[in-house]
Image (spheres, rainbow, N blue to C red):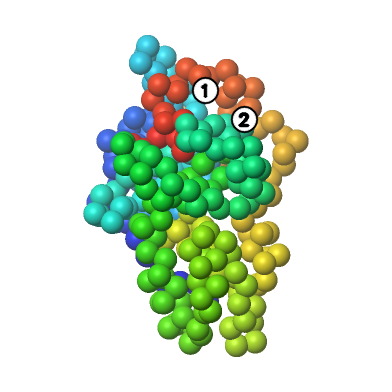
């Protein structure tokens, strides 16, 4: 039922120079645990990674964040980062209702002006980091993805169902004798996901279950022996103290586009 993996990246596509700005050398990148490296190269959002960012004053800060490789319609590869935040931080005009909808797992479809150009974008909240993930609607090629899904599963969606998907709303379908849910998910490389199960299963998969009472976050950390280990990364209190120091190197909406 899964769509074929699209937008998969090769080792030669890895932007080593940009990763180096995060304290991750080529050697360290290639020594990542297999599941972490495969997730990164697939175009999905990675688990948390402990990075080291140097401010303009030369101070080095530990910043836990997630990585994602994306490709625009022109074929340009970009490295996106989603740092851990205490709450939603955005330089785009989001009202309280929109922020609440994001916290509840909805995906917004909103026209945003960036670099002097207005574009329609999807906006999704990463629950664990509180960072916003944004993608241009046109880059997702949703009509093509819907048509491909219809062909593979020999089904025909109604006009209202197609419009709901294009608005960023997931829908539930019956394929054969199975219920499936489909919709936009910006954590996926193609920005589109098919889940076996009803909408309750869709919601369950969308929301990361982690210990909210724990001040720390689990993620991948490079040890002094240059080995990657899965352990607790920087806690909330330390992040609170450092996030303002590194903001000069970050876009306040979705982190850095390196």
- Total marks in image: 2
- Seen at 54% across and 32% down, the residue is 89
Cα separation, mark 2 vs mark 1, equals 10 Å
* CA neighbours of label 2 inside 10 A, class few (<14), some (14 to 19), many (20+): some
Residue 105 image position (x, y, % from top left): 63, 51
- Seen at 48% across and 48% down, the residue is 110
Q: Residue furthest top?
A: 57
Relative horizontal placement of residue 133, taking residue 95 as reference (left or right): left
Relative horizontal placement of residue 111, taking residue 207 as reference (left or right): left
Residue 115 image position (x, y, % from top left): 31, 36
The circle drawn on residue 86 is 2
- Seen at 60% across and 43% down, the residue is 98
User: Is residue 116 positioned above or below 235 on the image?
Assistant: below
Does any portion of residue 25 appear in the rendered image? Answer: no
Residue 203 image position (x, y, % from top left): 66, 59
Residue 86 image position (x, y, % from top left): 62, 30
The circle drawn on residue 24 is none
Relative horizontal placement of residue 138, taking residue 146 as reference (left or right): left
Most foreground residue, 230 or 74: 74
- Seen at 36% across and 44% down, the residue is 118
State which quarter of the image contains the C terminus.
top left
User: Is residue 255 positioned above or below 136 on the image?
Assistant: above
Q: Secondary structure at mark 1?
A: helix
Q: Which residue is mark 1?
A: 243
* CA neighbours of label 1 inside 10 A, class few (<14), some (14 to 19), many (20+): some
Does any portion of residue 258 appear in the rendered image? Answer: yes
Most foreground residue, 201 or 52: 201
Q: Are marks 2 and 1 in contact (CB under 8 Å)?
A: yes
Relative horizontal placement of residue 240, taking residue 251 as reference (left or right): right
């Amino acid at each position: 039922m899964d769509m074929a993996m699209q937008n998969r990246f090769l080792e030669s596509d890895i932007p080593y120079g940009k990763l180096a700005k995060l304290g991750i050398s080529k050697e360290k990148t290639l020594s990542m645990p297999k599941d972490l490296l495969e997730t990164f190269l697939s175009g999905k959002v990675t688990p948390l990674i402990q990075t080291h960012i140097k401010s303009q004053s030369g101070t080095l800060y530990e910043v836990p964040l997630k990585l994602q490789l994306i490709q625009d319609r022109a074929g340009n590869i970009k490295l996106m980062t989603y740092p851990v935040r205490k709450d939603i931080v955005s330089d785009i005009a989001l009202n309280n209702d929109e922020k609440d909808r994001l916290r509840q797992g909805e995906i917004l479809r909103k026209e945003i002006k960036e670099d002097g150009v207005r574009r329609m974008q999807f906006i999704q909240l990463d629950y664990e980091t509180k960072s916003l993930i944004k993608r241009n609607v046109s880059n997702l090629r949703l009509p093509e993805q819907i048509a491909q899904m219809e062909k593979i599963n020999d089904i025909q969606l109604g006009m209202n169902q197609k419009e709901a998907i294009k608005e960023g709303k997931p829908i539930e379908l019956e394929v054969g004798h199975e219920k499936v849910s489909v919709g936009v998910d910006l954590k996926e490389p193609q920005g589109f996901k098919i889940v076996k199960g009803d909408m309750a299963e869709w919601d369950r998969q969308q929301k990361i279950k982690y210990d909210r009472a724990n001040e720390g976050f689990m993620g991948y950390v490079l040890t002094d022996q240059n080995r990657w280990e899965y352990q607790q990364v920087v806690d909330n209190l330390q992040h609170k103290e450092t996030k303002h120091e590194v903001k000069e190197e970050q876009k306040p909406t979705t982190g850095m586009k390196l």
